[in-house]
Amino acid sequence: MKLSELMQGKTPSASFEGFSTADDMVLAIDFTGTLSSPSDYDDYIVAQVGITEQSGSLSAQTQDSQYLRTGSVSIKTGTSRSFNITGDRYTGDSFQDAILAHAIKYGTGQEVIKSYVYFNMLTGKGEKGKVSIAVADDLSGAAGDNAGFSVTLSSTVKPEEYTYTPPTPDPPAGG
């Protein structure tokens, strides 16, 4: 499913107030490596079908220093982003087919670095960046269970602030 399909008929509001659920968070990836302008984001592929968990996490890096008469002080030097995605395998879903493709499972370096957007569909606010994709499990499970998979996405650059903007409708023909 493309981002444009998921967001059809939905208009995020920057002034939304209230609780958000995990279902409100949208993760979409450019598996082609060719979609770079803001108008292309609507063609990113969304993680949805069969996904049981999509956990975004942040990890702060710190540097500890010992100072005279102060003692040990930790200074934050950076933050890295990662996502853990688990789910039940659904063959035919464009996101799962792409992320579990042979080229991704066994790829290295730049082959597995892809652009993403991650945002709250209620507010439209989130981030964009690049992640390295590492498939940990594919088609795993016990007899009689759904086949499962798990993937870790790790940021390769500092994410930028992103706000989803619905596409502008095309003007009527002949107008």
Image (cartoon, rainbow, N blue to C red):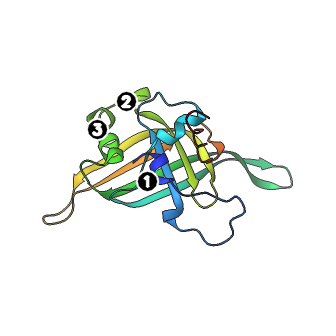
The amino acid type of the residue labelled 2 equals: Thr
The amino acid type of the residue labelled 1 equals: Asn
Question: Residue at position x 50%, y 65% from top?
Answer: 22
Give the camera-side residue of 65 and 99.
99
Q: Position of residue 135 (x, y in %)?
A: 34, 44
| Left or right relative to 27: residue 92 | left
Where 116 sits versus 60, above or below? above
Q: Which mark is residue 108?
A: 2
Where 144 sits versus 105, above or below? below
| Left or right relative to 7: residue 94 | left
Q: Which mark is residue 84?
A: 1
Residue at the far bottom in the pictured view: 18
- Whether residue 156 is visible to the viewer of this picture, yes or no, is no
Residue at the far front in the pictured view: 174
Q: Which mark is residue 101?
A: 3
Give the camera-side residue of 73 and 1.
1
Question: Residue at position x 54%, y 45% from top?
Answer: 117
Q: CA distance from mark 1 to mark 2?
A: 19 Å
Q: Quadrant of the C terminus?
A: top right
Q: Position of residue 146 (x, y in %)?
A: 21, 62
Q: CA distance from mark 3 to mark 2?
A: 13 Å
| Left or right relative to 14: residue 157 | left
Q: Give the secondary structure at mark 3.
A: loop
Sequence-first tag of 3 and 2: 3
